[in-house]
Each structure stands twice: as C-alpha cells, then as structure tokens.
Amino acid sequence: MNTARLGIHSRLVHGGYHPDATGAVNVPIYQSSTFAFRNAAHGAALFAGEEEGYIYTRIGNPTIRVLEDSVAELEGGVGGVATSSGLGAISTLYMALLEMGAHAVSTASVYGPSRGLIEKHFSRFGIGASFVDTSALDNLRQAIRPETRLVYVETPSNPAMQVTDIAGAAKIAHDHGSLLAVDNTFASPYLQNPLDLGADVVLHSVTKFINGHADVVGGILVATDDEVLQRLRDVMVHMGCSMDPHQAFLVLRGLKTLGIRVEQAQAGAQAIARWLETHPKIQSVRYIGLPSHPQHELARLQMRGFGSMISFEMKGGLEAGRRLMNHVKLATLAVSLGGVETLIEHPASMTHAAMSRKAREAAGFADGLVRYSVGIENADDLIADLEQALEAV
Ligand SMILES: *Cc1c(COP(=O)(O)O)cnc(C)c1O
C-alpha cells in the first residue's frame, strides 16, 4: 500500500509492508541465511545470478527490508540500512563518510560511545574531530575546518537535554561542503524529521523509542541521496554489522505503537517535570517541554512534541542521588531509555562513576543529576513513587 499520504499513526501501522501471497498480516520472519538463485532448471529467464533479488542475509533480507522501508518512509528518505545496534549505525556512518585526514564536528554532549569511537578508534586512521556545544551555532561555525566532511549532531542530547537547530546546522555544513547527520534517537521519527529540515542522514538506536519494549538492540540509518545510501549499505555489508531477521520482526512490532507510546509518555513527562520543578529537594529540572528550558522555543519549532526524557538535579549532590536510587520502587534502576517502563539513572554513581567529579562537570553534569526516562505508566503513580523516594533522601 502507498501510505505516503496517510496520517502518522496509519503510516506507523502500514508503512513499508506489501503482503505476500499468503496474505500474512505481519511480515514473516525470513529466518534464512541464504536465498536460492533460480537457474534455468527452475524456469529462470536470465542466467543464474543476473536477476534482482535476495542473495544472503548480511546483504539483505525481506523482513529487514520492511523495517528499512518503513523507517525510510517515516523519515522522508530514499531508503534505510538496518544495523545490529545503534553503534553499528554510527560506526557505519563514520566509516562511509570519513576518509584519512578528514575531520568531523560533533555535539559535545553526544552519546558517550559516539564520541569515544572517533577519539579512541577512528583517530588511529588519521581522522580528527571537534566536540562543541552545537546548541549555539556559532560554536559549530567556528569548529569547521577545510577538511571537515561530517557534521554530526545529536538533538535533543543526553543527559544535558540540549537542542540544536537542525536547519541552521544543515546550512553551515552545506556551505562548507560537509554533510549533516543527526542522531534522532531521543525524539524518534514521531516527533522530529531531520531530513525535512535539511540533514543528509538520520540515524536511530532502535533499541530505544522505535522498538520501545527493552527487548532488542538495533540501529538504522536513512539517507536523502541514493549515492550516500549506497555508500552506507556497502560499508555495513563489509563490516558485517547487519541486523538479524528476528530482531527486525520485533522492532517492526514495536514501531506500530510508537505514536501512542510517545503520546502517553510525553504527557506523563510534562506532568512529572512540572511537579519536580516545585519540589523543595530539587535544584533544577531540564525538560524541553518546560518554558524554563533554554531551547524550549526552538524545540517547539522543529519538533512535534517534547518527548519523555527528563534530567533533574538534586540538592545534596552525589549522596542525595544515591539515596534516591535506593528508594524508587516503580521506576527501574537501569541504563537505556525510550521503553514502556520508566527507567531512572544516576550518572555520578552508575554509568559515569569511574570519571572524576571534575571530568563529569566538564562533560556538563553535576553529581546530583538524575536521568529519568518516562514510560507509559500512570503519571500519578510515577509522581507518588518519586515523592516517597524523595522523602527518604
Ligand atoms: C543508546 C544510544 C545509542 C547507541 O545505541 P545502541 O543500540 O545501544 O548501540 C546512540 N545514540 C543514542 C542517543 C542512544 O541513546
């Protein structure tokens, strides 16, 4: 079905899928590593190997193709490349677009491993990168060099919740002969479409909102240009970070309810963020849906909603954060985000405990910072849970 003119919820349910001869309502899991070439003995009109079709699952697979086509349609690109993980998508992107001597400019508060991958590994091949606060475009403009080939922006970014002007970043990148890629994981295609704002490539960790059920790790890249898409696919195939058909099936199942999940979670997030802002034990709240957020207006312009990620800072620093973690009951103490269940994380005592306080401050977060990924539970229950936990702090 051509779903291009349908509303977003209809596209989420029907996009990308063309029913096969059996009429199966959902795409079957084509759990096959390889696909037979039809030779003359099987009625092929062409010499074996000359026909279009599936060859080998690392190169392409019918179940994975449905996911690639549906996310590509949602993002308004020419096609997609699904990968084994979000980092698989990011490493494919860097490998495809950066050659020896090239330089990239990226958001300083980007997902940690997206930065580590360049600084620790791509640097070994003579690739440089500058990490700047891209929420102020002047920083981006100043960081561009003649050899800059890629501007890589994450918006909203994590856990600082900074928003970057995508159309502005696209203009700067293009004026300097660079491409713009956007990590759209936090917003999901339901809330933000970077390609419509001028980006050349958009990527997701589908582990988060797109799948939404904390049971799969995966990634996807979507491009606006056939030649760029081919480069991405060629690198993915050669590096071997392909998705698995069963993984694709689960992600497709999650994708159908992306819209209703995001609507429910962001309504909860708005209520929780407002409530947190008035709590005496909370120093500050960073939620892009609050008028107090420095890029609230920009988020309103380039997104269709504010999503469900909240960061807040506790008075009382490290110890207060640790005590809060010990007393939440409904929210689960875990990394990751974007699932139906609410997750809470305290970087200073959990994911970033190995860093010094100074290093954490340089990365833009204080010891009392807590990251809260709102799920689809009732907001009243989540507020009651936070209230009882904050009483114990
Ligand atoms: C989780 C995440 C990634 C990495 O994705 P994986 O699926 O864990 O490999 C990249 N970017 C953002 C913003 C993320 O939240």
Image (tube, grey):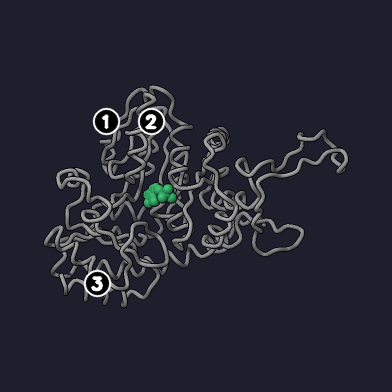
Residue where numbered disc 3 is placed: 386
Q: Position of residue 85 (x, y in %)?
A: 47, 48
Q: Give residue 332's position: percent from left, percent from top.
A: 33, 67
**As drawn, 23 above or below 36:** below
As shown in the figure, which amino acid type bears the numbered disc 1?
Gln
Name the residue nearer the viewer: 307 or 392: 392
Position of residue 272 measured from the top left corner of the image (x, y, whole percent): 28, 69
Q: Is residue 302 visible?
A: no
Q: Quadrant of residue 19?
A: bottom right
Q: CA distance from mark 2 to mark 3?
A: 42 Å
Residue 183 in view: yes
Q: CA distance from mark 3 to mark 1?
A: 42 Å
* Number of residues whose C-alpha sits closer than 10 Å to that of mark 1, classed few (under 14), some (14–19) or many (20 or more): few
Q: Which residue is mark 2?
A: 122
**Residue sitting at x 21%, y 67%:** 324
Residue linked to disc 1: 142
Whether residue 147 is situated above or below residue 163 in the rendered picture? above
Give the alpha-carbon distance from disc 1 to disc 2, as whole Å: 22 Å
Q: Amino acid at mark 2?
A: Phe
* Element on which disc 2 rests: helix
Mark 3 sits near ligand 1, with its Cβ under 8 Å away: no
